[in-house]
Amino acid sequence: MPAKKKLRKPSGGAGRSKKGENLDLREDLILAGEKLLQSNSLEEFSLRKVAAIAGVSHVATYHYFENKNSLLAAIAERGFQKYFSDFEEEVQNTTGDFYDRFISLGWTYINFHIENRQYARIMFGGGGLELSSQKELRAVSRKTYKQLREIISTGQREGKISSGNSREKTLAAWAMIHGIAMLILEKRLNPGKSKSEIRKFVHSVTEYAYAGMRGSG
């Protein structure tokens, strides 16, 4: 087990360390939590194990996170930041029109599940998180739905998707792409061995989702 870090001396508050040190140790704990999730199930996740990886006492974790749920929420927020960054990077390599954005979103969503399982399990798989007590996470998680709906609304304005029922179209497309992603995450579906095979598979799946929205409204 790694050597325990000495708790930073408090400055003024009861058991609180300096602001900069607070942020540093909080970051250490988030990174330790991400590392733990790479090799352990959510059921095995605990603040005590995270503290051991970070090299601090178990008690120190409670200065930054009220419980396991709040740490998982912080990790999930970090995951959403990465997910949206990945999408914007993917779009930069396209023409940026409706079709390219829609295909890019499908690829980013599914590929994120493949390459970032430690995030995806708590971001999109539920992970037992109580979103009602995590306002910031609840807000950012809704952005994925809004993102897809905005793309579909753009497609309707451009006449590439039939008009009307944008909510239903969004839910249908989301359910299809999310379902594929979860099957991959749960290792019940193998999308391919190489990156090119996986991308071809995802492109085909996303194309089917698009085809279903081109009919009459």
Image (tube, rainbow, N blue to C red):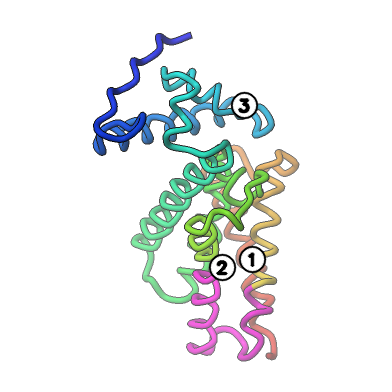
Q: Residue at x 53, y 43 (%)?
A: 70
Please indicate, yes or no, whether residue 124 appears anywhere in the rendered image: yes
Q: Residues within 10 Å of mark 2 (few under 14, many from 20)?
A: some
The amino acid on which the numbered mark 1 sits, given as a three-letter code, is Trp
Residue at mark 1: 174
Residue at mark 2: 145
- Does 25 lie within the magenta span? no
CB atoms of marks 1 and 2 within 8 Å:
yes
Q: Residue at x 31, y 37 (%)?
A: 23
Assign the magenta stretch its main secondary structure: helix
Residue at mark 3: 40
| Percent position of residue 61, x then y | 46, 29
| Percent position of residue 162, x then y | 62, 88
Highlighted magenta segment, given as a residue range: 145-170
Secondary structure under tag 2 reads: helix
The amino acid on which the numbered mark 3 sits, given as a three-letter code, is Asn
